[in-house]
């Protein structure tokens, strides 16, 4: 009894609850906090050991993955089975025993399509551009098809793909997850020279307008059309990209009015294609770099990254106005970023193409992927954690964009590799090609940057935590970077020819051999598919 003589109800402490409640409550915490709790309390440690659900949360978070809801996949594998499968696949990458991995060779000789627009989730997206004698074709090919998977192929007769006949097609974007093909085009040569374009939206598996599109044709805004008409004379480069409800078209031209300094004028138009055929969301600027060094990428569903001599992050959440600059990440010295690799390597499941996509149980976390930026002078590869683009803090959004010096973001969130020969990125894994000795022979180095890879590599691979120093000669400078990773070297060596056409996704490596009769042929040759699977030595 208390001093007032009243009964006091005893407090129920957390540890007095049933173990099932411990697991249930802990499951709402981020994976790092679950680990902290289980590392300081024996009772919670025991709860963790006996709970497949908690272990699965930590395994997903530590590998930088997100679970795909069971309702989206129709896959009713138990949590304990998912956990074991996830650990096995991670362990297989640590082994990286390519001699023992299963592989198949697929003939692609009959695929005369000019462009491989993407390779994701075991599917090739192919595009054949219209010529005077033939129409246009799009094809979605499961590389190693299962019984439930079929190739989708669509053919359009000459002049029928766009809403106006004899249009000049400048770029095509295909999204199998949304059954979408978007076609950027100009109506006639004068418009092509002036940089005035349209974008038509169609269904990949049908002849009509895409059922979710706001309309058949997307139009440039008045501002973008005016800029292109006044300033552009010769179109040099066009890029059409998309993610989810967003589509963007970038055009850049070489422009040299009276000054002796070459200039590149570029503009970017964005649309929310599911809700409107027009948009006031656009960007434009002038740079002294060549147009190949101007790149844009969708980072998550509401952010856009422009890469040139620095990295500029924009919010595109409000499509009724110009994208809002959130932050500018300065590079360590003046560079021209020639190319970036930002993997969007998981085809989501959609009602239209659900039978075409592989049944998956997890996907890489867009906030914790890797961005690879290449520079030409000097030749470097910057491996960057996309976490920096989401760690701005709520107090920065809506205020003046922050300029972030290299020393504030680069050293701890990147690794720099000099003179990259070939690099592929998937989620938090990087594959690099390194010289392996005389005879133009090369090995693959797998680098896993996920936290659990560094902490639990099962005794395999080389953990790199210490900073690495890269010497730069022009300008004279040293770069020190320290993003941790695990490195494993392949037991197999490769000829250079087969490594020029190399892709990687969640569980596979794809190597393209050119046709034997004519290595310079635009046709594909043999596609070697290496399945990264656990090796059973029992």
Image: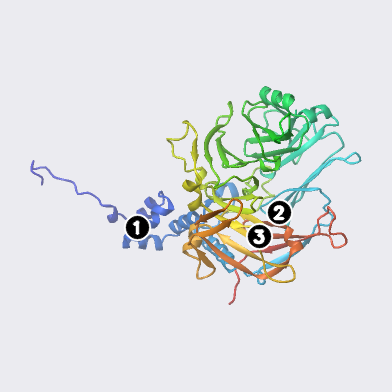
Q: Is 175 positioned to the left or the right of 393 in the image?
A: right
Instruction: Give SS at disc 3.
Output: strand
**Above or below for 324 versus 95:** above
User: Residue at (84%, 51%) from the top-left corner?
Assistant: 112
User: Residue at (81%, 56%) from the top-left corner?
Assistant: 524
Q: Crowding near pointer 2: few (<14 within 10 Å), some, many (20+)?
A: few
User: Residue at (79%, 30%) from the top-left corner?
Assistant: 193
Which mark, by number, is residue 148?
A: 2
**Above or below for 238 versus 454:** above
| Relative image position of residue 102 (x, y in whole percent) | 68, 68
Outermost residue, right direction?
133
Res 359 visible:
no
Res 60 visible:
yes
User: Residue at (37%, 60%) from the top-left corner?
Assistant: 47
Q: Indicate which disc, 2 or 3, sits on the residue closer to the N terminus.
A: 2
**Above or below for 221 versus 449:** above
Image marks 2 and 3: residues in contact by CB distance under 8 Å: no
Image marks 3 and 1: residues in contact by CB distance under 8 Å: no
Instruction: Give SS at disc 2.
Output: loop
Q: CA distance from mark 3 to mark 1?
A: 40 Å
Residue beneath disc 3: 508
**In what quadrant of the picture does the C terminus appear?**
bottom right
| Relative image position of residue 44 (x, y in whole percent) | 34, 59
Q: Nearer the viewer, residue 450 or 361?
A: 450
Q: Nearer the viewer, mark 3 or mark 1?
A: 3
| Relative image position of residue 271 (x, y in whole percent) | 64, 31
Q: Indicate which disc, 1 or 2, sits on the residue closer to the N terminus.
A: 1
Residue beneath disc 1: 19
């Amino acid at each position: 009894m208390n001093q007032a003589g009243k009964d006091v109800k005893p407090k129920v402490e957390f540890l007095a609850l049933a173990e099932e409640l411990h697991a249930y409550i802990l499951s709402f915490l981020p994976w790092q906090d679950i680990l902290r709790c289980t590392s300081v309390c024996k009772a919670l440690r025991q709860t963790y050991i006996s709970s497949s659900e908690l272990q699965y949360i930590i395994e997903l978070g530590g590998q930088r993955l997100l679970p795909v809801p069971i309702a989206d996949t129709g896959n009713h594998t138990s949590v304990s089975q998912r956990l074991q499968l996830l650990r096995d696949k991670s362990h297989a990458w640590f082994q990286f025993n390519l001699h023992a991995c299963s592989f198949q060779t697929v003939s692609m000789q009959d695929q005369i399509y000019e462009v491989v627009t993407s390779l994701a989730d075991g599917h090739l997206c192919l595009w054949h551009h219209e010529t005077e004698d033939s129409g246009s074709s799009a094809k979605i090919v499961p590389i190693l098809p299962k019984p439930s998977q079929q190739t989708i192929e669509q053919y359009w007769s000459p002049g029928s793909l766009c809403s106006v006949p004899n249009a000049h097609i400048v770029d095509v974007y295909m999204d199998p997850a949304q059954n979408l093909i978007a076609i950027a085009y100009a109506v006639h040569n004068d418009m092509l020279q002036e940089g005035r374009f349209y974008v038509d939206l169609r269904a990949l598996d049908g002849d009509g307008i895409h059922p979710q599109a706001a309309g058949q044709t997307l139009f440039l805004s008045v501002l973008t059309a005016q800029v292109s008409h006044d300033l552009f004379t010769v179109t040099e480069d066009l890029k059409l990209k998309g993610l989810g409800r967003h589509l963007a078209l970038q055009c850049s031209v070489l422009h040299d009015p009276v000054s002796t300094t070459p200039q590149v004028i570029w503009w970017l138009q964005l649309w929310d294609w599911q809700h409107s055929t027009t948009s006031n969301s656009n960007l434009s600027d002038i740079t002294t770099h060549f147009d190949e060094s101007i790149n844009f990428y969708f980072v998550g569903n509401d952010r856009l990254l422009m890469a040139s001599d620095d990295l500029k992050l924009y919010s595109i959440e409000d499509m009724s106005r110009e994208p809002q600059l959130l932050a500018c990440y300065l590079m360590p010295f003046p560079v021209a970023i020639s190319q970036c690799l930002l993997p969007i390597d998981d085809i989501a499941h959609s009602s239209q193409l659900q039978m075409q996509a592989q049944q998956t149980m997890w996907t890489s976390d867009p906030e914790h992927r890797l961005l690879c930026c290449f520079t030409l002078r000097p030749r470097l590869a910057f491996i960057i954690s996309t976490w920096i683009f989401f760690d701005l803090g709520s107090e920065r959004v809506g205020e003046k964009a922050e300029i972030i010096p290299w020393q504030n973001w680069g050293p701890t969130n990147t690794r720099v590799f000099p003179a990259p020969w070939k690099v592929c990125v998937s989620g938090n894994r990087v594959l690099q090609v390194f010289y392996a000795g005389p005879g133009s022979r090369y090995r693959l180095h797998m680098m896993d940057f996920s936290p659990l890879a560094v902490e639990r590599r099962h005794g395999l691979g080389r953990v790199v935590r210490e900073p690495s120093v890269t010497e730069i000669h022009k300008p004279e400078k040293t770069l020190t970077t320290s993003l941790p990773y695990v490195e494993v070297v392949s037991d197999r060596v490769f000829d250079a020819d087969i490594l020029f056409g190399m892709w990687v996704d969640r569980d596979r490596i794809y190597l393209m051999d050119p046709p034997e009769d004519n290595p310079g042929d635009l046709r594909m040759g043999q596609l070697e598919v290496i399945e990264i699977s656990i090796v059973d030595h029992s």
